[in-house]
Image (spheres, grey):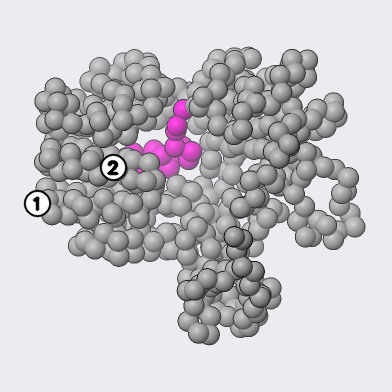
Amino acid sequence: MGKKKTDRIIFENVTVLDAGAKGVSVAKAPEGQVIFIPNVVPGDVVDVQTFKKRKSYFEGKAIKFHSFSENRIEPVCEHFGACGGCKWQNMKYEQQLFYKNNEVFNNLKRIGKIDLPDFEPILGSEKQLFYRNKMEFGFSDTRWLTESQIQSSEENLSKKNALGFHVPKMWDKILDIDKCWLQEDPSNDIRNSIKEFADKNGMTFFNARNHEGLLRTLMIRTASTGEIMVLIQFFEDDKANRELMMDFIHEKFPQITSLQYVINSKANDTLYDQDIKLYKGRDYILEEMEGLKFSINAKSFYQTNSDQAYELYKITREFAGLTGNEVVYDLYTGTGTIAQFVSKKAKKVIGVEAVPEAIADAKENAKRNEITNCEFYVGDMKNVFNDDFIAKHGKPDVIITDPPRDGMHKDVVEMLLKTGAPKIVYVSCNSATQARDLALMDEMYKVTRVRPVDMFPQTHHVENVVLLELR
């Protein structure tokens, strides 16, 4: 049974009150229901037209502005509003930090219901633009047109191909991007040159509904060392056109360190089960941090803001308070970056991760960095992290845990409590699930330090670091 259509309602002179979840802002209807509104800033006064109604809330859009918030700024990106990537680009950066800090505090207080120390100041990003080291773009043979493009007499509606980002909530729609402000040059030049060359040579762009077309996705990774990785995902196995494109990229951008491709004819774009082919260069790029070098391949997870990753790791190490005598467990270690970053101040570091390729990278990086006091193990955390594991590697003095957005499995939390480690440093990209886990540990552990870190300016996302000490 389909959803019942609702009549659209217009609320006039509504004051935007707060920044809400997922980058949208919050207002109140006359009868008290919450209204979620995108592309507005707290303090704006607007007329809102609703397009969705539920029992306790509406979703709508601003159709008229009566006055603007003092915290509003002009977005630098021409694609703001149509692209869902930088939803807070119309808000002053200091206000972005204010709302991120509030989100962390409210989650820990309301969900965790625990006693909290005074928060240490949220660490803002020195770069608010061009800070990402990884971008992924989609090809489409039916580009998404905004209302202004449709109405513009200067828009060439016959140009159907797009290379850019998925339109929010539309899995098969791609917004063509001219300039993205998230990744430093030559990212924009690489993307635009690839699109122009493909158009010029009649290469087909992917159609997500019909599952046809040559060009599917483009990934560009950069590193603070200046190294660059480019990976083209082809849907069809067309050797002549594939080599034509790859040779063009290599000749046009000789500074590319790693040029790779994959032929992916399955239903989704994920690379993790794909056979990636090296075309030119080497199959990884190198990131550097405090003299340590980390290889990043096409499938590697690495924090996508290199500068802030360094700050995040420094805070993590500071919270751990290592003296050189501690046994440290690094749970959800990924490619072992945190483990190796803290290793010079620890006696031994044990890293655990579920992804075999990540552990292979961690071991290779430790070898490259001549680190001998780190050991890495692969397996599902709730199965690997058990009594036998503790008996084999020794009771930890400090546990660092950096789980995915879903937080830790309850069995992992139970094992954390069982170890009774004097300190736990909990790094999280989702303070709501972090709060849930902290509540489970509250009887044994007291939260003594909290510091949010902004990894993603212009968005609502925020990392948080918490120090727990045994009561």
As for residue 303 lying within the magenta part, the answer is yes
Relative side of 29 to 464, left or right: right
The local secondary structure at tag 2 comes to: loop
Is most of the magenta stretch helix, strand or loop? Answer: helix
> As shown in the figure, which amino acid type bears the numbered disc 2?
His
Q: State which mark lies toward you, 2 or 1.
A: 2
Q: Do we see residue 233 in this rendering?
A: yes
Stretch of the chain drawn in magenta: 300-315
Relative side of 299 to 373, left or right: right
Give the residue pinned by disc 1. Answer: 471
| Placement of 322 over or under 39, stated as above or below | above
In the picture, residue 376 is in which quadrant?
A: top left
Q: Residue furthest left?
A: 471
> As shown in the figure, which amino acid type bears the numbered disc 1?
Arg
Q: Which quadrant would the N terminus be assigned to in this image?
A: bottom right
| Placement of 96 over or under 378, stated as above or below | below
Q: Position of residue 203 (x, y in %)?
A: 80, 27
Which label sits on residue 283? Answer: none
Q: Which residue is pictured at 52% across the width and 71% down the height?
A: 54
Q: Which residue is pictured at 79% across the width and 60% down the height?
A: 148
Q: Are marks 2 and 1 in contact (CB under 8 Å)?
A: no
| Placement of 151 over or under 465, stated as above or below | below
As for residue 396 lying within the magenta part, the answer is no
Give the residue pinned by disc 2. Answer: 409
